[in-house]
Image (tube, rainbow, N blue to C red):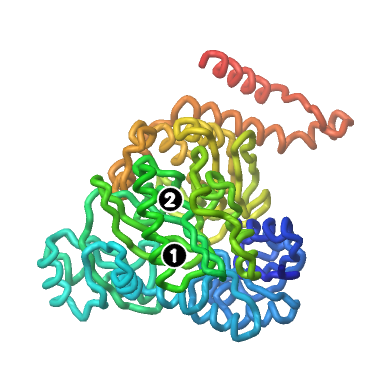
Amino acid sequence: MFSKILIANRGEIAVRIIRACRELGVRSVAVYSDADAGAPHVREADEAVHIGPPPSSESYLKGDRIIEAARRVGAEAIHPGYGFLSEREWFARAVRDAGLVFIGPPAEAIAAMGSKTAARQLAIAANVPVVPGTTEPLRDADEAREIAERFGYPVLLKAAAGGGGKGMRVVRESGELASSLETARREAKNAFGDDAVYVEKYITGPRHVEIQVLGDQHGTMLSLNERECSVQRRHQKMIEEAPSVAVSPALRRRMGETAVRAASAAGYTNAGTCEFLLDADGNFYFLEMNTRLQVEHPVTEFVTGIDLVQWQIRIAAGERLPFKQEEIVPRGWAIECRITSEDPANGFLPSTGKISYLHLPSGPGVRWDGGIEVGSEVGLFYDPMLAKLIVHAPTRDAAVERMHRALLELTIEGVESSRDFHLRVMEDAEFRAGDISIQWLERRLESLVNAAPSADIRTAAAIAALIADRDRHAPRRAAANGSSGTGATPSGPTADAWTRVARLEALR
């Protein structure tokens, strides 16, 4: 086992990796930009190294600077988390060339799966079903039009080098194709430094189902079963769950075997995810492989009992996986909500400010993976995700109810957040029935965003405001009363408001 690991990331995922290191008895080293000097991950780590100004291009994306920091503090390995440098083949290779261990797949596997067109070619060679489409980047609009007419509209233009909805455009008729191709190329160039775009048939109404794989350096490759990731806005996942209501045990086995075959063909080790489209008839098509830890990994951890981050580290240190495929079956149900600093009522515009109050949910089966605290500054330099709220329960219905309860307990003041939006999704009849697809949220978005707050949300908001008011004023009241503030009793308008809330709760 390593003695010291540098974490080349920030926010909640850095905190998550620090916790895994601590449980393994490994010292952790954080890196931070000027904007993150006071961030929780910096304080939680055993050591911290400053790496540059706030823009990620001048700090978290500076691979040479991060490698130099690791060597300077005597770290033996680097964990990239997700995002930033996690899927950069050149970085994995540079880490290895520096005599350090990259906690992830080999650089060659990242290269094999890093380009979507190359991954499609590899998948086809491994007898893995793919969505009908091209395996080479498009030359021009004329070629794209010829291929689209062969497949039939609608078609999907996709950036070859990336994901997350960047460089992706649905084209429903010929007249849209040239301008859509130009836009997709421009987005792809800006996001990934590569304007290569390919085309595939657009499948209407599929689910997004992905398979978590885990492989060691001794030839064992396992499927850790599926995650349902169909609740998406503009191709960005917002809610994930495991398992999926659409996957039977037989289909789970077939999809798992297919994912293992694709990963093995790439020479893969460590944690990775094969993403598939699943249609209403149970046909599934390989999309791509994410050669890193996924944001939604906690739902798999909940239903399998396997700590993915610890096993990433163990595998990188040369340990063998002790699990057998037949032992890995889903136990219960897990749901994850991505809590972001966005304002759903205003088109999900990013919200900035300082976290002035934070009350976290707790109780059985509730997990909070966060990178914020009271006083945290939320700016525009990085992704708007503040934290992940994850729950686990025996059944899906129970998990939905538990998530609803946990969201009601969550209070974030100082910035707008997606909390109320997630509450409305948990209350939605179609979501509760599992009647979702990749296009579901786009169809339901307006009604979910503009729906009047439920009685539960109004009550929770009132209680949160009162708790925040009490906590803000408790020290002043305590000083006036000559006490420590413990057990301070609200009085005046605040006490009246508490009485009204209590009455409302009694009537529900």
Instruction: Give the residue pinned by disc 2.
Output: 226
Residue farthest along the bottom direction in this orientation: 97
Relative to residue 266, is residue 314 depicted above or below?
above
Figure quadrant of residue 191: bottom left
Which residue occupies 42% across, 46% down?
Answer: 344
Where is residue 36? Give x, y as percent: 65, 64
For the N terminus, the quadrant is bottom right
In this view, the mark in front (2 or 1)? 2
Q: Can you name the residue that lies furthest to the right here?
A: 482
Q: Is residue 398 left or right of residue 159?
A: right
- Give x and y (percent) for residue 429: 35, 31
- The residue nearer to you, when weighing 9 against 111, is 111
Q: CA distance from mark 2 to mark 1?
A: 14 Å
Instruction: Place residue 63 in its image quadrant.
Output: bottom right
The residue indicated by pointer 1 is 290
> Residue at position x 36%, y 79% from top?
194
Which residue is at a point 30% across and 72% down the rendered structure image? 125
Q: Looking at the picture, tell me which residue is in the foreground, 143 or 289.
A: 289
Residue drawn 30% across the image and 66% down it: 127
* Label 1: which secondary element: strand
Q: Amino acid at mark 2?
A: Glu
Check whether the beta carbons of the residues at disc 2 and disc 1 lie within 8 A of each other. Answer: no
User: Callout 1, which amino acid?
Assistant: Asn
Reply above or below: 461 against 123.
Answer: above
Label 2: element kind: strand
